[in-house]
Image: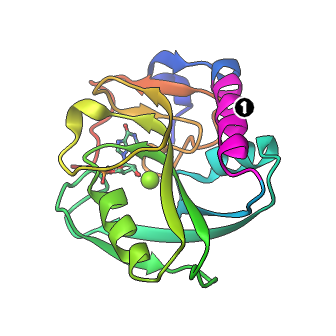
Amino acid sequence: MLPYEEFLEEILIPGNVLQARIAELGEEISRDYEGKSVLLVCILRGGVMFLTDLMRTLTIPHAIDFMAVSSYGTGARQSSGQVRITLDLQSSIEGEDVILVEDIIDSGHTIASVIELLKTRQPSSVRVCTLLDKHERREAEVPINYCGFKIPNKFVFGYGLDLDEYYRNLPFIGVVKPDKYIPPD
Ligand code: IMP
Ligand code: MG
């Protein structure tokens, strides 16, 4: 793989701006759930960076668990409307206050399917916390309770989001050069 600079059109959200907003989200969540404890469910793999930074800003007791899903379609961006669970939760969520932690909500199909599935397991509540919201591309109706940033309809990478699995480590969100990378459909 080439150095990430080859693919970077511009930095959309610098690292310090990400961290400041994540701290605000952590405060808001800690206030909303005061006196309770929550289960953070991270959707692998893109949500990992966001999860670990968000956790450090929470003052309420919380546990974490992970899920991985893949679209029935040809690629991560395929809006087939159905997802397949490739890794399920280890914990029972019955009676738990669950917060789904996502990197980005695009068409909304992924998170909509996950919510539908989790609700069959009798959690006390399910809320959604996403770092990025590509709202122009929404197809499924998704209640977003906590949102870091609304972003334009551009393919982005870094801070958990990948280009062919690379560059998740970057501390910022960057826009990909359209002529250098074709996103999976
Ligand atoms: P949705 O089901 O269309 O909302 O798709 C959400 C998933 O598509 C995210 O969890 C990402 O894995 C992927 N995705 C959507 N847009 C981008 C992007 O700009 N960069 C990297 N991955 C993206
Ligand atoms: Mg994802």
> Residue shown at 74%/60% (left/top)?
36
What scheme was used to colour the molecule? rainbow
Q: Is residue 123 left or right of residue 51?
A: left
Kind of residue at badge 1? Ala
For the stretch drawn in magenta, the main secondary structure is helix
Magenta segment, which residues?
18-34
> Residue shown at 26%/57% (left/top)?
109
User: Can the viewer see residue 43 in this picture?
Assistant: yes
Q: Is residue 173 magenta?
A: no
Q: Is residue 136 left or right of residue 129?
A: left
Q: Which residue is mark 1?
A: 23
* Along the viewing direction, whichever of 111 and 25 lies nearer the viewer: 25
Residue 68 image position (x, y, % from top left):
48, 69
Q: Is residue 27 magenta?
A: yes
Residue 24 image position (x, y, % from top left):
68, 29
Please tell me whether residue 172 is drawn above or below residue 62 in the rendered image: above
Please tell me whether residue 30 is drawn above or below residue 123 in the rendered image: above
* Along the viewing direction, whichever of 94 and 152 lies nearer the viewer: 94
Residue 53 image position (x, y, % from top left):
73, 42
